[in-house]
């Protein structure tokens, strides 16, 4: 009789934990995924409110993510795509900065648009060409510096940096100071150049739900908070002890540090996401709007129902506004400040504005400021039988979370414990 294979316990049902579980399942390894929350997804969750789909924090899925291409069924996600490029609010007006490679009609408007000079636009062309050369591995081994220093080395004007790169990259990395890793900046820019920004029609939560749907029934236990990791399993806060051949800690870095002492936690960056409903969209196009004026609470916004009509009930529009931190401001005051800025930008087009919900997310994304927290493939193996994964160990992104989960599974398999 064949020996029964021992199970693996994965602590955390976010993207990295689910990706790890999926890889182990492909090798027919018995597994159990535990999560303290009431649903899967970790930092990628979506709520339903009055017929609207509200992602917990503005997020987009980049179709060019290589790990996602291997792991996900894009047709099953029913993706809705943004227009390439962005609209920039600058000097009291809106200007289109498009991607002429994928939207040739935007070439002239982009060349003459503010902010930035013609020389700046040509440098963007050079940047695009340089980051698309060679493999992604080569790009991620490029010299590590802060994104702002990298951009300045390319001699972009201060106007272009402050009015385009700062809100665009600041929104992507939740870091308006642009101290984020230059490797992360170049990887992100390449992903935007190689594919589309999109959201699933049912909300971003459709991504972890698709991964979970492929796991064996009953293999995910929710509302199960782990108190401690032991040599051969875990102890829950309710006192239960669960045995396992190996344990994978797939939580956020703060929780991982608690379970894996004396590991020091990676700092996390916060964001605030404010949702409004309207009778009709002030934009009427699926595009990201950046605040290039450097004043007011708004960093960027998007009418989500212009991208995915399924995000709003018929006859309504859903506006998502992203504010970088501002946790010290009372919610009501912040909402009023955002509303005032929207009225300044759009006038009567936002007369029907109604507040839906504000999400304050203090631990939204790992800080990836080099040298201490720069981008690199950090080891998944703590010791034989104990492994760790999460986007803070790779590149802080959906792709990084999935990649880290796979690497943890492969490290575990290499140890031949199961």
Image: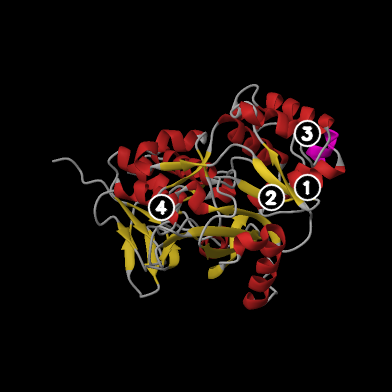
- Residue at the extreme top of the image, as rendered: 134
Q: Position of residue 285 (x, y in %)?
A: 56, 45
Give the label on residue 417, or none. Answer: none
Q: Indicate how the structure is coloured in the image.
A: secondary structure
Q: In the figure, 277 relative to 74: above or below?
A: below
The residue carrying mark 3 is 112
The residue carrying mark 2 is 290
Give the label on residue 310, or none. Answer: 4
- Residue at the extreme front of the image, as rendered: 348
Residue 146 appears in the picture as rendered: no
The residue carrying mark 1 is 163
Name which residue lies at 57% across and 63% down. Answer: 254
Task: Find the distance from the CA under tag 3 to the CA under tag 1.
Answer: 15 Å
Mark 1 secondary-structure assignment: helix
Q: Position of residue 45 (x, y in %)?
A: 45, 58
Q: Earlier in the sequence, mark 4 or mark 3?
A: 3
Task: Find the distance from the CA under tag 2 to the CA under tag 4.
Answer: 23 Å
Task: Find the distance from the CA under tag 4 to the CA under tag 1.
Answer: 32 Å
Mark 2 secondary-structure assignment: strand
Magenta region, main secondary structure:
helix
Q: In the figure, 285 relative to 192: above or below?
A: below
């Amino acid at each position: 009789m064949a020996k029964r294979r021992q199970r693996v316990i994965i602590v955390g049902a976010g993207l990295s934990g689910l990706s790890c579980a999926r890889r182990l399942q492909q090798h027919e390894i018995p597994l159990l995924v535990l999560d303290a929350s009431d649903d899967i997804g970790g930092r990628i969750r979506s709520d339903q409110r009055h017929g609207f789909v509200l992602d917990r924090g503005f997020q987009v899925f980049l179709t060019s993510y290589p790990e996602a291409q291997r792991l996900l069924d894009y047709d099953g996600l029913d993706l809705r795509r943004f227009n390439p490029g962005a609209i920039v609010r600058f000097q009291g007006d809106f200007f289109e900065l498009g991607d002429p490679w994928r939207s040739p009609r935007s070439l002239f408007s982009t060349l003459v648009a503010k902010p930035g000079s013609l020389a700046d636009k040509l440098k963007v062309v050079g940047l695009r060409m340089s980051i698309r050369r060679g493999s992604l591995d080569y790009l991620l081994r490029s010299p590590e510096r802060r994104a702002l220093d990298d951009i300045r080395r390319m001699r972009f004007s201060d106007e272009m940096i402050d009015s385009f790169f700062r809100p665009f990259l600041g929104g992507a990395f939740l870091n308006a100071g642009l101290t984020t890793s230059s490797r992360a900046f170049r990887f992100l820019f390449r992903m935007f150049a190689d594919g589309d920004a999109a959201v699933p029609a049912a909300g971003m939560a459709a991504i972890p739900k698709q991964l979970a749907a492929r796991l064996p029934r009953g293999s995910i236990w929710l509302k199960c908070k782990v108190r401690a990791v032991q040599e051969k399993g875990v102890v829950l806060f309710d006192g239960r002890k669960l045995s396992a051949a190996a344990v994978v800690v797939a939580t956020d870095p703060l929780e991982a540090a608690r379970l894996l002492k004396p590991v020091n936690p990676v700092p996390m960056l916060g964001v605030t996401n404010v949702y409004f409903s309207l009778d009709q969209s002030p934009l009427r196009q699926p595009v990201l709007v950046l605040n290039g004026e450097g004043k007011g609470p708004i960093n960027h916004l998007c009418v989500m129902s212009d991208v995915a009509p399924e995000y709003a009930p018929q006859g309504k529009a859903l506006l998502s506004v992203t504010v970088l931190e501002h946790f010290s401001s009372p919610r009501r005051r912040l909402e009023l400040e955002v509303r005032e800025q929207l009225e300044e930008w759009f006038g009567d087009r936002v007369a029907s504005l109604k507040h839906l919900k504000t999400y304050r997310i203090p631990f939204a994304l790992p800080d990836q400021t080099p040298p201490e927290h720069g981008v690199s493939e950090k080891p998944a193996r703590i010791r034989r039988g104990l492994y760790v994964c999460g986007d803070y160990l790779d590149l802080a992104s959906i792709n990084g979370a999935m990649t880290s989960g796979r690497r943890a599974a492969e490290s575990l398999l290499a140890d031949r414990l199961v």
